Amino acid sequence: MRERGTLLGKPDREPVQLTAGPMDFLGPIPSKDGKKLFVVGSLARAELARYDLKSHQFVPFMSGISAEALTYSKDGQWVTYTSIPEGNLFRSRVDGSEKLQLTFPPVTAYEPRWSPDGKRIAFQGSRPGQNWRMYLISADGGEAEELMTGIGDLGWSPDGKSLIFHSGMEDLVSTSPRAVQLMDLKTRKVSQLPGSEGFYSPRWSPDGNYISALQVGAEVLQLYDVRTSKWTKLEDIPVGWPIWSSDSKYIYFDSTESVPKLYRIRIADHSLEQVASFQGIRLAPTLGGSLTGLTPDDSPLVSRDVGTQEIYALDLELP
């Protein structure tokens, strides 16, 4: 943008775009002679990795695709995920074949979830400057159906008849009160789970017996027994991103400690076990936590940061 006017009249004060392309540029500083612009060029890329339970090492998974929030269909034959950094929603076979892009810019997709019958995918989506919205889309592609706005962390009921999510995201800074909500997909009626005020990030267990959630502020796990309609606190350790095991016996989560660790807690006796440490692992910045998914055998998935960040000198030619 031109700094000041001239003797010939009012100058053009509109900003002029200097760069374009997939690279993000940060912290521009002009050289002393004004002929160059020094910038930090950042190219975001991730590598999907699986924690091998035998070797205790993180190894590339699905050819190390740049993705997060990978989830499996109930039959274990399909996966859905969002790409990094574009935020596009994809689905494919587990071996990467029959890959199909389901969403396109300017929508940023997040947290896709398969329906129990494998026919639909629920996900959150946003457009620049707008709030998060809840969508449904066919696994075969097509137009996404918008269900409602101002929600977060959605998922399916085990019978596929309802979606579970938390309210309190009516504004972009997410300061509204949280609570766990259910939407009946037939009637589109929304109801609040009893006693869930101040809770968010709900997760329904695969067997349908429990719903886990995080408590605002303390960020600790709370467990709702569907049969008794009672809440129980599971653990005092701050929780990052909870995911149920496939047999509903454990909840896996990453901690928010200075050195993040991966834990699981057993539902039967509430015993806590450390599964892995992220010490020395360069994790990609994601919309969720460090833990970005579980395979059908409960092997944890993470997104490792393999992007670049370097200093560039751009030739600057001013009019």
Image (cartoon, rainbow, N blue to C red):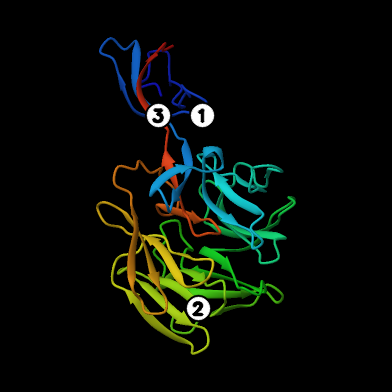
Question: Quarter of the image holding residue 261?
Answer: bottom left
As helix, strand or loop, the secondary structure at mark 1 comes to loop
Residue at left 42%, top 34%?
Answer: 306
Which residue is disc 1 drawn over? 22
Which residue is disc 2 drawn over? 210
**Amino acid residing under circle 2:** Tyr
- Is residue 319 positioned above or below 221 on the image? above
Q: Earlier in the sequence, mark 3 or mark 1?
A: 1
Viewer-nearest of discs 3 and 1: 3
**Amino acid residing under circle 3:** Thr
- In this picture, residue 36 sits left or right of residue 10: left
Question: Quarter of the image holding residue 147?
Answer: bottom right
Q: Which of marks 1 and 2 is nearer the N terminus?
A: 1
Q: Where is residue 40 in the image (x, y as percent from the top left)?
A: 35, 26
CA distance for labels 3 and 2:
42 Å
Numbered tag placed on residue 308 in the rendering: 3
